[in-house]
Image: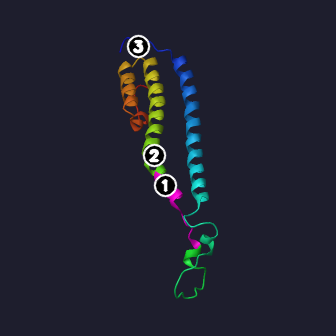
Amino acid sequence: MASWDIQPQGVQGQLKVVGTHAEDLGKALTALLADMQEAASAAGTAVPGSQAVMMRPQGPVVAPQQAPLWAKQQSTGPVAAALAEYAAQRKKNLKAMADRCQAAVLGAAKATNEYVQGDLEAAKNAQNAASAVQVDALKDFGGKK
């Protein structure tokens, strides 16, 4: 590791650029999830048009003191179910993407700080933690202060 030749100012500049892109990615993912929720609620049900609103239970029904249970429930259709399943299946990948971004930024910053302080072993450890996406290890990363 003695062959490292890092320019801390250059690393700092690149981390700012990456940080900006990571924030943009976070905003895009938040907007995606909000748009999917809106699409799911707007998609309606498999019952055509106003028939969903007009449906009443069949058979003998006791007159309730309050609004019937079926009136409180919002029906979801196949589109909403598909969107929910899509989001659930992608959750692990989206979290992994966010963790990898965070690990890369934290690892580069910590490795550079350790390099500046002359602790090449600690710099190597930070670099290894970043490549293994060990975000918790990077947050708690010690080294010389």
Q: Which residue is mark 3?
A: 4
Q: Earlier in the sequence, mark 2 or mark 1?
A: 1
Region of the chain picked out in magenta, as a range: 72-85
In 3D space, how far apart are the residues under numbered discs 2 and 1 (Cα atoms)? 12 Å
* Disc number placed over residue 90 in the picture, else none: 2
Q: Nearer the viewer, mark 3 or mark 2?
A: 2
Does the CB distance between marks 2 and 1 fall below 8 Å?
Answer: no
Spot occupied by residue 34 in the image (x, y as percentages of width and height): 59, 50
Q: Disc 3 marks which amino acid?
A: Trp
The one nearer the camera, 48 or 86, is 48
- Kindly tell me whether residue 20 is visible in this rendering: yes
Q: Nearer the viewer, mark 1 or mark 3?
A: 1
The one nearer the camera, 55 or 127, is 55
Please indicate whether residue 132 sits to the left or right of residue 18 in the image. Answer: left
Spot occupied by residue 132 in the image (x, y as percentages of width and height): 36, 32
Dividing the picture into quarters, in which one does residue 135 lie?
top left
In 3D space, how far apart are the residues under numbered discs 1 and 3 (Cα atoms)? 50 Å
Q: Residue at x 46, y 22 (%)?
A: 113
Q: Disc 1 marks which amino acid?
A: Ala
